[in-house]
Amino acid sequence: MRITDTSDLWWKTAVVYCLDVQTFMDWSDDGMGDMVGLTERLDYLHELGVTCLWLMPFYPTADRDDGYDVTDYYGVDPRLGSAGDFVEVVRTARDRGMRVIVDLVVNHTSDRHPWFRSARSSPSSPFRDFYIWRTDEPPDTSQQVVFPDKEDSLWQYDDKAEAWYFHRFYRSQPDLNITNPLVRDEILKAMGYWLELGVSGFRVDAVPFVIETTGVDAQELARFHDPHSYLRQLRELVGRRTGDGILLGECNLPHKDQRTFFGGSDGDELTMQFDFIGMQNLYLSLAREDARPLARALKQRPAVDEQSQWATFVRNHDELTLDKLKPAERDEVFAAFGPDPEMQLYGRGLRRRLPPMLDGDPRRVRMVYSLLFSLPGTPVLFYGEEIGMGENLDVPGRLAVRTPMQWNAQPNGGFSRARPSRLRRPVTTGPYGPEHVNVADQRKDPDSLLSFVATLIRRYRESPELGWAEFRVLDQPHRHVLAHECAHDDRRLVAVHNLAPGGCVVPFTLEGCDSSHHLVDLLHDDVEVAIDDRGRVEVALEGYGYRWLRLVSRDSRRLT
Ligand code: NOJ
């Protein structure tokens, strides 16, 4: 890898930051975050080291799924600002060296989208075939619903249409009929619009469902033989229109299936995918204080094309899903991090943020973020993680983790000067409330979590071998320790993490090394670790300790 490759395939060493405009910063004081508020906070994100913003849906919406139910693919929710305000976000972010990607929600529309309103009104509507209909009684699909607390079928009877329509998510989100070429053209056109406004790609919502054809009748299916060819088309469009735009796909699938969604060895479908399997096994490892589930998951990642990339994450805006663990494993994680039924959701996940799950233990929280940034891949942060925000369990369902960003200790955490009752969502209270957890205090404190995360980001960006990694788990005797190496050409970084509270010494051997090499600790100033003539190393770790060690040879010219 040449250093110039990192600016070419920029997403392989990016630091992605997910935020929802409506809960980030309210500049108009109406209680709702807005584009102007986000623009005012871009310098904060730049200072943190973020290189790519992922904006959750900000389109006009019926607001039955927090914006994931779009009523207009070409607009900005007027409560958040105008299209002009959006362009100002993108333009100012670009000036600060940050790209912007936006959520692309095209598995479904809102049932209030003009297409669906027309479709349901008459069988002869030009939009009827934009959705998936049946007139005979649907089978029992209660086991397949995504939100079992609210839905018991994938089909909803519509009185106006006198037919059932298919919906993978809530009934207010009718699925688009992707076998219809007119639908596919509309999606490409909408993407082209946002690309023209300067975005660098999309976080693609619910990708496996976007290209699934469940419920489509045989005749329609016959015109759509290869659903993956559609993903290739989306990727080509982004490539043609921008040169270096990306698709970051949400595919919560087993690793082997994710390879298919990358486009296999051709790498011509999704540019990046979240590593849900790695994330779920991270929590199992934390719960057991045993690094092996995580190590196994990482080793099982399939090899992917050089342009493809894994997106690593600790938390996102949804429930912390544990759906790919075995039931007994899931129960272990529930018992460790969310024993109370009100912390759990859909029988498969937790509606919590990380610090409260770890009882606020700062050593453990830092160890987890150190791990996140040292894993092979591109790290994705969810807003507020950098300051250690907690959830608000009084807020229903998944929204518990989507409370306003906490900027300072003032009323509403500095998010808005509106009356608390007018806020988009209540601020977190208690030990994780803004009096205790906020940006303003942590910015001034070099020992804060915020300062620590900024350091991790700086070190991550200085170590492109993490993003381009050839990854290896190093043999060592402790179950509770993960020692791994990320290497690319002559760049090599060893990371050692202790998942347990007791200190230990970790011996391991580095292939191809001898006493002419040494290791430089990137997180603790002025510490060097020796390597003996046979490549053997011993590293001391405190309880929940972590070390990032850069391999340096005698003739190395890298800055340390
Ligand atoms: C996945 C999104 O992350 C989630 O928040 C949303 O409810 C569903 N897709 C439906 O769009």
Image (cartoon, rainbow, N blue to C red):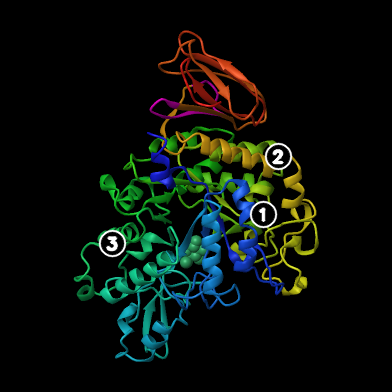
Residue on which disc 1 sits: 340
Q: Residue at x 34, y 40 (%)?
A: 302
Name the quadrant of the N terminus. top left
In this picture, residue 284 sits left or right of residue 126: right
In this picture, residue 154 sits left or right of residue 339: left
- Along the line of sight, which residue is nearer the eye, 408 or 323? 408
Residue on which disc 2 sits: 362
x and y, in percent, of residue 114 in the image: 42, 84
Location of residue 141 (image quadrant):
bottom left
Name the quadrant of the C terminus. top right
**The magenta stretch spans which residues?**
476-491
Disc 1 is placed on an element classified as: loop
Residue on which disc 3 sits: 233
Look at label 1 and name its amino acid: Asp
Disc 2 is placed on an element classified as: helix
Q: Residue at x 33, y 41 (%)?
A: 306
Vertical side of 458 occupied by 484: above or below:
above
Location of residue 4 (image quadrant):
top left
- Which mark, residue 408? none
| Lower position in the chain sequence, tag 3 or tag 1 | 3
Circle nearer the viewer, 1 or 2 = 2
- Is residue 275 inside the magenta stretch? no
